[in-house]
């Protein structure tokens, strides 16, 4: 049976970096946030429901998703956040279940779901375990500001919408401490992969 692992964490904690390392070890990764974007852009039923809920401005004249407009609709509006989630999340869930069946058929040992929100959407109930990636907050701000060309203030504003790190850590099955260099991170990822799959990682003595 394919094992399933959620990977989450605050902005800039290193989720994507961890997932790339897991992929290199033999896991398959389902990027839930990319999948949600794809579904909003392409799924005709979702398009109809978004237009119904938020109006025709949800898509531009060329039929492309109007992200800026939708971001405005949900910013600081819990009811609208809930509406959009009710439209998109069931489809992301269905896509993940399809990925699970495919991984099973392909003999993949570990299917990873990377998502900025996992506990918030109840996603942890459908996964064997959840790993939370955490890093010192100043380090996260510095890394994201550098990666995205954002100001520290902009990064902090994005952080304010997420569960606090203590809460994530409390709910995690595994905590990955991304507080050192990439080799330090890779050792923890290899240990996690071995624990989840019972397989070796080909780097004896480094765990
Ligand atoms: P987001 O929440 O924005 O999706 P994320 O949690 O996926 O971010 P990453 O994109 O993996 O975080 O990491 C943020 C940035 O920090 C990237 O540019 C990444 O290369 C860098 N980074 C992550 N971990 C380390 C590390 N241990 N040492 C140096 N750089 C790192």
Image (cartoon, rainbow, N blue to C red):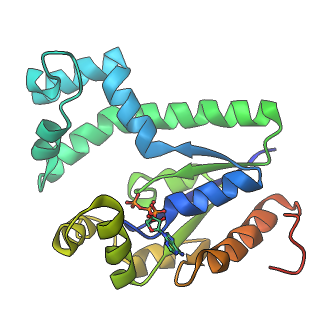
Q: Which residue is drawn at 82% across and 79% down?
A: 206
User: Horizontal and vertical percent for residue 76?
Assistant: 12, 56
85 vs 118, left or right, is left
Relative to 148, is 61 on the left or the right?
A: left
Does residue 195 appear left or right of residue 40 in this picture? right
Q: What's the residue at 49%, 78% (across, down)?
A: 169
Of 199 and 78, which appears nearest the observer?
199
In the displayed structure image, the side of residue 206 where residue 58 appears, left or right: left
Classify residue 161 by image quadrant: bottom left
Please, is residue 27 above or below residue 154 in the view? above
Q: In which quarter of the image is the C terminus?
A: bottom right
Q: Nearer the viewer, residue 191 or 74?
A: 191
Judge whether 86 appears above or below 115 on screen.
above
Residue 118 position (above or below residue 131) = above
Q: Which residue is found at the position 30% from the left and 59% from the top?
A: 148
Residue 178: quarter of image: bottom right
Q: Which residue is drawn at 84% across and 63% down?
A: 201
In front of the other: 153 or 145? 145
Please tell me how many numbered marks the rendered image carries: 0
x and y, in percent, of residue 28 in the image: 68, 45
Residue 62 location, x and y as percent? 18, 15
Quarter the N terminus occupies: top right
Nearest the eye: 70 or 26 = 26
């Amino acid at each position: 049976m394919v094992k399933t692992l959620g990977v989450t964490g605050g902005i800039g904690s290193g989720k994507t970096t961890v997932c790339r390392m897991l992929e290199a070890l033999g896991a398959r990764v389902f990027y839930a946030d990319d999948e949600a974007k794809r579904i909003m852009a392409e799924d005709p039923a979702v398009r109809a429901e978004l237009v119904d809920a938020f109006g025709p401005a949800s898509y531009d004249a060329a039929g492309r998703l109007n992200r800026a407009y939708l971001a405005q609709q949900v910013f600081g509006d819990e009811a609208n956040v809930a509406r959009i989630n009710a439209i998109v999340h069931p489809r992301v869930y269905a896509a993940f279940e399809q990925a699970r069946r495919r991984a099973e058929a392909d003999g993949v040992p570990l299917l990873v779901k990377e998502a900025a929100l996992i506990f918030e959407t109840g996603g942890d109930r459908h996964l064997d375990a959840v790993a939370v990636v955490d890093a010192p907050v100043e380090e996260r701000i510095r890394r994201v500001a550098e990666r995205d060309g954002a100001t520290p203030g902009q990064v902090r504003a994005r952080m304010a919408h997420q569960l606090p790190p203590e809460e994530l850590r409390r709910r995690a099955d595994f905590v990955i401490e991304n507080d050192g260099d990439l080799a330090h991170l890779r050792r923890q990822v290899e240990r996690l992969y071995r624990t989840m799959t019972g397989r070796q990682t080909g780097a004896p003595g480094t765990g």
